[in-house]
Image: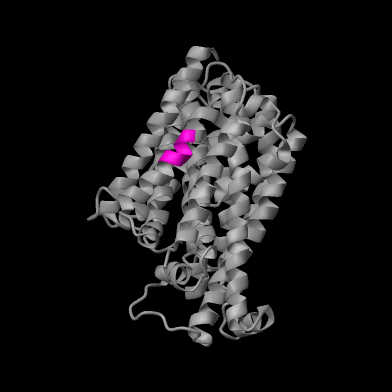
Amino acid sequence: MFTLLDWIVLVAYILFSVFVGLWASRGKKDFKGYMLGGGSMPWVAIGISLIATSVSATTFLGNPADSYATNMTFLMNNFGALIAIVVVGVVFIPRIKRAGISSAYELFEKHFSRGVRRIAAVFYSLHLLLRMGILLYAPSLVLAPILGIDIHVAILITALVATAYTWYGGFKAVVWTDVLQFGVLFGGGILTLLIIAHGVGGLGPMYTMASEAGKTVWFNASDWNPANARNLLSAGFVYAVIEIAIRGCDQQFVQRYLSCKSSKEANASSILSMVLGIFVSILFFWVGAGLYVFYQVKGIVPLPPGTAINEVFPHFIVNVLPPGATGLVVAAIYAAAMSSLSSAINALGNTTVKDILLIRDESAKSLSKAKMWTLLWAVLSTGCAFIAVDMKSSLLSNALFFTGLFTGPLLALFLLAFFTKRVSPRAVIGGVLCGMTSIVLFNKVPLFPAYEPPFAGTVSFFWNPLISCTATLVCANILRFIFPRPKAIGAL
């Protein structure tokens, strides 16, 4: 039950988050300061902000549910993250820092055309809007019943708080609140794990019982079936493409690299985020394994009949955690949701002004437009979350489809910009369309439920960005012979 003490803890955290955001962004702000923190942010803060942006409330709630139901095999994602850190550090960050750009997709105008830059920015914005809908909707499914409020109210609280400090303070407010929110998120996870361990007799016995139940299995190199998402091929190596696309091409990440003083500091922040990400994933998978021991092995207290897998952790939060601890863990869920949302709307404000509207000056007028678009994207994401309330789980499946649809071609565009000289804008756009079309050969199309893909079930969802990226690269290089470029532009 959510007690008065829990409400005090939660409200105090929300108010403190707003205070930190406003305090960090004090002083005069120009466009560069609002969007990039002046280009001189501490790399440690940026590294924490990178992982706080990546870890959403769905991670906080979803990882425990996954290990409770199966095991820890998705820890193999960290192999992909390690590969991505090396590739992004060697290939992407130096070129991005050297290019003299102020947004991720400005690079495409330098190498191809304004049209390619605009198309890339629109694709990214659509993809991120869907993701923001999930970032608001998924945690609200849990927060609403815990707090005893309507789900729409839960969504509004998260959106209003994150939008308030982001709109006023810009990038600095986002980064420093990310630091606070990551601390609360990680602390909430540790506190939960310790309480679970105490309930089952200690960390040692919990480890032994979880291992005997098969919950600690995390590595699978014996199965190389591409349709299986839980093997080293899919969850490790192929997942690296997703990580490269996110860490190298996402405006949220590029924005943070540009805010560092040098490529060396940007790489240091990237490495720090990966290390912290490993600890976060291990922690929350262990929360799920501990919950399995608590409920299924030891049977400390019974679960209500019909409790779904995704409801086990929320039930524990409400009914087992002591007063105060419940408030802290709920605050951690809010922390994860607000961190991801604030970063997204700030990045979209910058992308809209610089890459879609193509406003080149960085005057006070441009700053006002960026703040206006930041607010508008927050409203749109809230509306998307409200739609998700009616659509239920279909939003998640739609978002997975559009992630593969957009992220693979975006990665291909960066690779074409870095390593090719003779690909024309028309060939690039044609390649992107081919890459996007390739996805429908393996996946159902949300808008056409009757459509049956010819290769459905042959690969897991981890493969989608790799498929669309490869198809884009191949088709663009074929089309360059049909649509030649009159004058080559050197790669960075």
Q: Residue at x 36, y 79 (%)?
A: 304
Q: How many marks?
A: 0
Looking at the image, can residue 116 be seen?
no
Name, please, the residue furthest toward the front. Answer: 4
Give x and y (percent) for residue 122. Answer: 41, 31
In the image, taking residue 354 as reference, residue 202 lies left or right, namely right
Give x and y (percent) for residue 89. Answer: 71, 41
Quadrant location, the N terminus: bottom left
| Rendered image coloring scheme | one colour
Indicate whether 34 appears above or below 76.
above
Looking at the image, can residue 454 be seen?
yes
Indicate whether 474 appears above or below 226.
above
| Frontmost residue, 140 versus 480 | 140
- Classified by dominant secondary structure, the portion drawn in magenta counts as helix
| Frontmost residue, 108 versus 386 | 386
Give x and y (percent) for residue 319. Answer: 44, 72
In the image, taking residue 402 as reference, residue 107 lies left or right, namely right
Name, please, the residue furthest toward the right. Answer: 264
Q: Is residue 163 magenta?
A: yes
Name, please, the residue furthest toward the left. Answer: 450
Q: Residue at x 71, y 48 (%)?
A: 272
Q: Is residue 372 magenta?
A: no
Give x and y (percent) for residue 8. Answer: 49, 54
Indicate whether 306 appears above or below 23.
below
Q: Residue at x 38, y 30 (%)?
A: 376
Q: What is the span of residues highlighted in magenta in the rendered image?
A: 160-164
| Frontmost residue, 117 versus 302 | 302
Quadrant location, the C terminus: top right
